[in-house]
Amino acid sequence: MKRFHFKSNYSLWLLPIGTFLLLTFGCKQAPVDQHLENIPKENLLEVLLEGNMRFAEDHPIHPDQTLKRLRELNKGQHPVAAIVSCSDSRVPPELVFDQGLGDLFVIRNAGNIVGDYEIGSLEYAIEHLEVPLVIILGHTNCGAIGAFVDHDHDHSHHYSAYIQKIIDFIDAEEEEKALPRDIPNFFEKAVEANVLHGVHALKKALPSVDSLIAEKKLRVVGAIYDLESGKVRVLEEN
């Protein structure tokens, strides 16, 4: 009886250890090549959105974030997407899309504005780095758009000269002027309008963009990142 009791306890003791080893090693997925330069360009947007889903579901894999990768990139960069995003500390594109070093050519400013300097950076990315994808990425609760909305409804509020320049830039966008001011979701629609302005401004400034899109060499999309869910929603694709 004593011997049987010992074996039973021994088996019960081994059970959780075996389960742990199975979950740790037996179910481990094989590593996947996450280098974006190896992905067909027509699939890149979908791959970035898959990365965003990993981020939003709290299961990021953090690819290409090693010192080895950094040293490989010392030979040259080959990003697969150019992204204009807000400077907001909550909107880092590499984390939002769960990508790594050398994957994204990122241009950031308050309000993800697409003006002359941003278009110059995008032109470099398109013409010299030959990125096949451009994303103009806005986000919910954007402070720059919020300042524009507040100013639009109450001109008595005064901002510093440089912040006022940002507000004036957004206020001058045709897409913002077209929005009815009395709609209940004016803030949300103003964020979208600012993103669409960026898409239109890029195409207007660089005639080569439409040609590259027609030849299936480039995709230009507008998107919104939701701070609450962590998900990116595509607005426009051509």
Image (tube, rainbow, N blue to C red):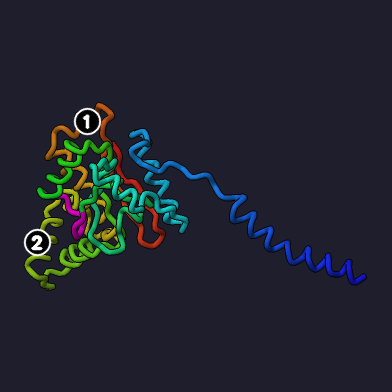
Q: Quarter of the image containing the N terminus?
A: bottom right
Residue 191 among those drawn in magenta:
no
The magenta-colored residue range is 108-115
Most foreground residue, 206 or 26: 26
Residues at marks 1 and 2 touching, judged by CB atoms closer than 8 Å: no
Q: Residue furthest left?
A: 161
The disc at residue 212 is 1
Q: CA distance from mark 1 to mark 2?
A: 33 Å
- Relative side of 177 to 85, left or right: left
Q: Quadrant of residue 167?
A: bottom left
**Local secondary structure at mark 2:** helix
Q: Position of residue 36 (x, y in %)?
A: 35, 41
Q: Position of residue 105 (x, y in %)?
A: 24, 47
Kind of residue at badge 1: Leu
- The residue drawn where x is 11% and y is 56% is 169
The disc, 1 or 2, on the residue closer to the chain's N-terminal end is 2
Looking at the image, is 109 positioned above or below residue 45? below
- The residue drawn where x is 26% and y is 34% is 218
Magenta: main secondary structure equals loop
Q: Residue furthest right?
A: 1
Counting the numbered discs, the total is 2
Residue 109 among those drawn in magenta:
yes
The disc at residue 165 is 2
**Local secondary structure at mark 1:** helix
Most foreground residue, 213 or 175: 213
- The residue drawn where x is 42% and y is 55% is 55
Q: Quadrant of residue 237?
A: top left
